[in-house]
Image: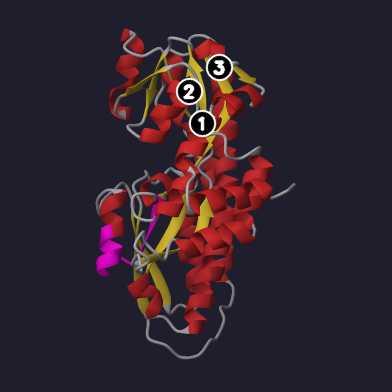
Amino acid sequence: MKKAYLTLGFLVGLVAASLLFALLKPNNGGGSDNKRLKVAHGLPTTHPVHAGIEHFGERLLFYSGGRMQVEIYPNGQLGSETQTLEQMQAGTLDAAKVGGATLGSFVPTAKVFSLPYLFRSSEHYWEVLNGEVGQAMLDMLATNATGDPSGFRGIGYYDAGSRNFYAQKAILQPADLAGMKIRVMNDPVAIDMMKALGASPTPISWGELYTALQQGVVDGAENNPPSFVTSRHFEICKEFVFDHHSRVPDVLIVSSSTWDGLSEEEQGWMQQAAKDSTEYQRAAWAQGVAEALELMEAEGVNVQDTDMAPFVEATESVRAKYAVGELKALVERIQAVGK
């Protein structure tokens, strides 16, 4: 590969900038015992999420005057996202990065992120997440389907991009998907979306997808540009179309037992560190996407935008099927933002 997912130079620059903050004189808040927080995620240390969590630790150290430190466990060292959520519920893990799709198995309202073509644009997506509705969605994570405490809470959104179609032919309208076997995650919403668009949904593990594309087991797949590049799917699929059918954030989650054990001041430090961290990570993600697109162009991949409207219309029945009860009200709030 001509470039790594994030260039070493860019990461060095990011780390250097954040270290500058850590070297400044920290706040002298009220006295409290030193705390070391365990934070887990399942991604490599070259990923923007890891850079974001490192920045979270640096900013928390700064705000707390050195009294709150973060110990990071990357690469799934502490288990899957489901396992880390269970550990936070048990009070054996302080915090973790968890994908919105995984959260949906624990908190029903988080399933909203799985609905296809929910967000009109990137601007609409971030206006929702950065505003009152996004904060309400973080607050909802503290309660499970039965109305009982979930055992964790959300404190910030990391960028995970949008999912888009790629294949050996351009998918510019739903009709282009007719009869195509498209790899999907083994998720009911994703499967129903593909059926509504006229494709044949084919659940295959991510690790087996390269061979499946190579051997024609599937005709195409969908993901974001950095994942498309790191998986080297550009060696097979030369058409990549931005239809943005799914935008699912990664969420910074904190155990309720950890949160409840903090003073108000410490909670404030953690919230501010999380805010700094998400802004930092989003910049790193944007750089990763830019580098991925540059490599895709160099490798002869034809990248196009398309009109979302026909896709939105074709999948209306899918959104209606899953957006019921509390989820329906949440969808209405999301769609009202910016109108």
User: Which residue appears at 63% of the width and 56% of the height?
Assistant: 130
Q: Quadrant of the N terminus?
A: top left
Q: How is the image coloured?
A: secondary structure
Distance between the alpha carbons at the discs numbered 3 and 1: 15 Å
- Mark 2 and mark 1 in contact? Answer it, CB < 8 Å: yes
Q: What x and y, as percent, mark residue 135?
A: 57, 62
- Say what amino acid the circle numbered 1 marks: Ser
Residue at 30 percent of width and 25 percent of height: 204
- The residue drawn where x is 53% and y is 28% is 315
Q: Are marks 2 and 3 in contact (CB under 8 Å)?
A: no
| Dot in front, 2 or 3 | 2
Looking at the image, is mark 3 or mark 1 nearer the viewer?
Answer: 1
Residue 171's image quarter? top right
What label sits on residue 196 in the rendered view?
A: 2
198 horizontally vs 41: left or right: right
Residue ID for mark 3: 174
Residue 239 or 51: which is nearer the viewer? 239
Q: Tell me the crowding category of disc 2: few under 14, some 14 to 19, or many 20 or more residues within 10 angstroms, Cα based.
A: some
Magenta-tinted stretch: 86-98
Q: Is mark 3 on a helix, strand or loop?
A: helix
Query: Which amino acid type corresponds to the residue marked 2 in the rendered image?
Result: Ala
Say if 316 sits above or below 264 in the image.
above
Q: Which of marks 2 and 1 is in front?
A: 1
Q: Which amino acid does label 3 sit on?
A: Pro
The residue tagged 1 is 317
Residue 20 counted in the magenta span: no
Q: Where is residue 308 in the image (x, y as percent from the top left)?
A: 64, 26
Residue 18 appears at what percent x and percent y?
56, 60
Residue 92 seen in this snapshot: no
Is disc 2 placed on a helix, strand or loop? helix
